[in-house]
Image (cartoon, rainbow, N blue to C red):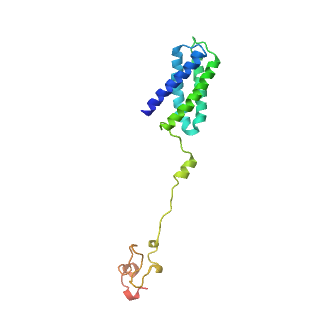
Amino acid sequence: MKTIIAIIVKFFAMLAAAWIAFIMFGTAALWTVFMIAAAATALNFLIGDLLLLPRLGNFTSAVIDGILGGATAWLIIALVPATFYYMTAVYVFAGIAFVVELLFHIYLLSTRVVEKKKTDEDFYKRQKLNYNMESGREIYPYSSRDSNESSGRTGTLGSGYNKSINQQDFDGGSVKKDERD
């Protein structure tokens, strides 16, 4: 739903920009202005907003959107035979489209219709995998430093190893309690 609202907002902004540029600074029919607004909306949203904005950022993609909008308007006006135009109107439309796109990109990013792509540097800074592990004495349960001669048991508390219970680990259970160490 957010995307549909964003496209409608963009269409009306491009319609206003085309109306200002081609009705006030040139002579174009109203249906030509609608065609320019619809084509500029579709191309700028697909190429500029969805493809370039996440990768290049606001300003660069707004410049490209302005140039793309001006080229789209020039192409449509050049193909419509009943329209008399000045290149000034195309330049004015490209300039207004640039300003509209600057503001529209802020709207897109704030409503999270388009999210800025994370660079590799951001990815590795924030989501660096940590392969460290916690280890204690339970890795070496048979070491002599774990022995507790007063209780007759070795191993750490909770390590799961107890020589008095697990005699079979050493020699199949034939060692007596006095012969252990």
Q: For this view, does 33 lie left or right of residue 165?
A: right
Which quarter of the rendering shows the N terminus?
Answer: top left
List x then y, in percent, for residue 159: 40, 73
- The picture quadrant where one finds residue 52 is top right
Please say if 133 is above or below 159: above
Which quarter of the rendering shows the C terminus?
Answer: bottom left
- Furthest toward the top, the residue is 82
For the point 53% across and 27% down, the residue is: 43
Residue 176 visible? no
- Furthest toward the bottom, the residue is 178
List x then y, in percent, for residue 91: 63, 22
List x then y, in percent, for residue 172: 37, 80
List x then y, in percent, for residue 150: 40, 85
Total marks shown come to 0
Please say if 124 is above or below 68: below
Nearer to the camera, 180 or 90: 90
Please say if 139 is above or below 54: below
Please say if 89 is above or below 59: above
Residue 54 visible? yes
